[in-house]
Image (cartoon, rainbow, N blue to C red):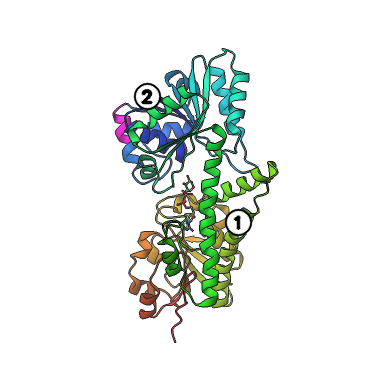
């Protein structure tokens, strides 16, 4: 199939590369000319494991192209995917101006039948608006169908998620559009769910909010574990072995972050309010998530007494491992708060340093070249992201390089027994603290 993807961010680029890899002809379009030049020069504007190889392979095979022209994308393709940002507005509403603008631009150059597929996460009923807009601005009276095809990929394992989806959701009104979409996804051999457009749009917000709810649920339990001496990891194992519940997304920690969950939960609450159906359960999910970071900070303050002038190392800046993304990262919020309270903070992250350096909030932090360099002379170490590199660190060297070996593990990455045996003062989430006598 000939496919255009409008918007070459995480979702657009990964989708385009994977579609090309299964044999489709793909043009990835973006209005950021610098980004397109970077891609045309064979470099990637983002880090995602495995993506570079797939992009290079398909560019060489002439199946993957980059362009800054929507006209070129629409002219050369049967199916046009929209994968542009839908950022939150201060009032929780979703900013749909990029979707609206792209819809007008498609309308402007649309002369023959095309399927316009929305892949961006949008409020229910957006598809209706897209269809109205294209109809209104299209001077050629061209026929088209609008489809909703939400994306469920996770950063860090996006290629795997796209190549082996649990399900493909196709929300459409016309059978012809459904048939074309099924052809696009045929090579992936995934279960397909066909729905109306509104249901497909709702599935995305409902799925992400449910996953956020799962995380807040286990985080609320971690507070009960802290108060009662139970172990949250064991509780998660025990409830997760029930197949109706499942162990995934039951890892307690300092809360969820990233460009999806915080935004999507807020948007879903707002959508409910606009439809006259307040979704108060999700407000509690947000409250627990924010509270988890505060509980962690309180633990740090209670242990260190005063943060002012303390040398604190922070491992991890990205919102989760295997990505360079620091957007809405709880790690960044922690560093920001500790800096404001007068601590001297040294940070290290395997992939997130470049993007973190651009953030004003943590401009006063020192950036170390390695995990062990970051802890040189530190009075405490905070683990904020569960990178493998930190799990495999030489713990004896870690202890030797710290002034006082106090570790706050916000992701339950290390083993409390091992930390105790090595003489660390070790705190984690929802598990008993190890305090040397
Ligand atoms: C998420 C959804 O998983 C994906 O389906 C959707 O398309 C986009 O949003 P992503 O934001 O990339 O993907 O990351 P994810 O792996 O879901 O993690 C989100 C946040 O939740 C991270 O901050 C992570 O640390 C946190 N998390 C996840 C937990 O705190 N505990 C868990 O058990 C799982």
Viewer-nearest residue: 155 or 230 = 230
In this figure, which residue is indicated by the disc labeled 2?
Answer: 1
Residue, x 51% and y 47% (percent of image)?
207
> What residue is shown at x 32% (from left), y 29% (from top)?
23
Residue 65 at x, y percent in the picture: 38, 27
Q: Which residue is mark 1?
A: 286
Disc 1 beta carbon < 8 A from ligand 1?
A: no
Residue 261 falls left or right of residue 243: right
The picture places residue 145, in percent across and down from the top left corner, at: 52, 23
Q: Quadrant of the C terminus?
A: bottom left
Quadrant in the picture for the N terminus: top left
**N-terminal label among 1 and 2:** 2
Main SS type for the magenta part? Answer: helix
The span shown in magenta is 55-62
* Label 1 element class: helix
Q: Nearer the viewer, residue 302 or 370?
A: 302
Q: Is residue 187 magenta?
A: no
């Amino acid at each position: 199939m000939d496919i255009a993807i409008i918007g070459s961010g995480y979702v657009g680029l990964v989708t385009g590369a994977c579609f090309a890899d299964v044999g489709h002809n793909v043009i990835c379009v973006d209005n950021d000319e610098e980004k397109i030049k970077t891609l045309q020069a064979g470099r990637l504007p983002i880090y995602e494991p495995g993506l570079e190889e797939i992009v290079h392979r398909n560019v060489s095979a002439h199946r993957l192209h980059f362009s800054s022209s929507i006209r070129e994308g629409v002219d050369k393709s049967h199916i046009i995917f929209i994968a542009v940002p839908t950022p939150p507005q201060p009032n929780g509403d979703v900013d749909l101006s990029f979707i609206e603008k792209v819809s007008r631009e498609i309308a402007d150059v649309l002369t023959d039948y095309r399927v316009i597929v929305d892949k961006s996460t949008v409020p229910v009923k957006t598809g209706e608006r897209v269809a109205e807009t294209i109809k209104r601005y299209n001077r050629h009276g061209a026929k088209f169908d609008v489809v909703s095809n939400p994306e469920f990929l996770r950063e860090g394992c996006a290629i795997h998620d796209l190549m082996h989806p649990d399900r493909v959701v196709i929300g459409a009104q016309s059978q012809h559009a459904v048939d074309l979409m099924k052809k696009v996804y045929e090579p992936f051999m995934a279960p397909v769910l066909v729905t109306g457009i509104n249901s497909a749009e709702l599935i995305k917000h409902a799925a992400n909010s449910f996953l956020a709810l799962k995380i807040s649920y286990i985080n609320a339990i971690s507070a009960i574990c802290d108060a009662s001496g139970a172990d949250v990891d064991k509780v998660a194992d025990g409830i997760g072995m029930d197949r109706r519940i499942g162990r995934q997304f039951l890892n307690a920690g300092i809360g969820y972050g990233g460009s999806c969950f915080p935004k999507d939960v807020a948007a879903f609450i707002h959508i409910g309010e606009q439809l006259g159906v307040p979704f108060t359960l999700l407000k509690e999910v947000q409250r627990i998530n924010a509270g988890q970071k505060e509980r962690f900070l309180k633990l740090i303050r209670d242990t260190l007494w005063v943060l002012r002038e303390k040398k604190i190392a922070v491992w991890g800046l990205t919102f989760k491992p295997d990505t360079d993304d620091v957007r809405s990262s709880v790690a960044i919020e922690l560093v920001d708060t500790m800096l404001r309270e007068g601590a001297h903070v040294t940070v290290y992250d395997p992939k997130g340093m470049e993007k973190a350096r651009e953030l004003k909030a943590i401009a006063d932090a020192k950036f170390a070249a390695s995990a062990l360099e970051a802890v040189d002379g530190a009075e405490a170490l905070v683990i904020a992201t569960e990178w493998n590199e930190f799990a495999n660190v030489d713990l004896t060297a870690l202890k030797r390089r710290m002034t006082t070996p106090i570790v706050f593990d916000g992701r339950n990455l290390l083993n409390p027994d091992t930390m105790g045996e090595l003489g660390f003062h070790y705190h984690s989430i929802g598990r008993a603290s190890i305090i040397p006598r």
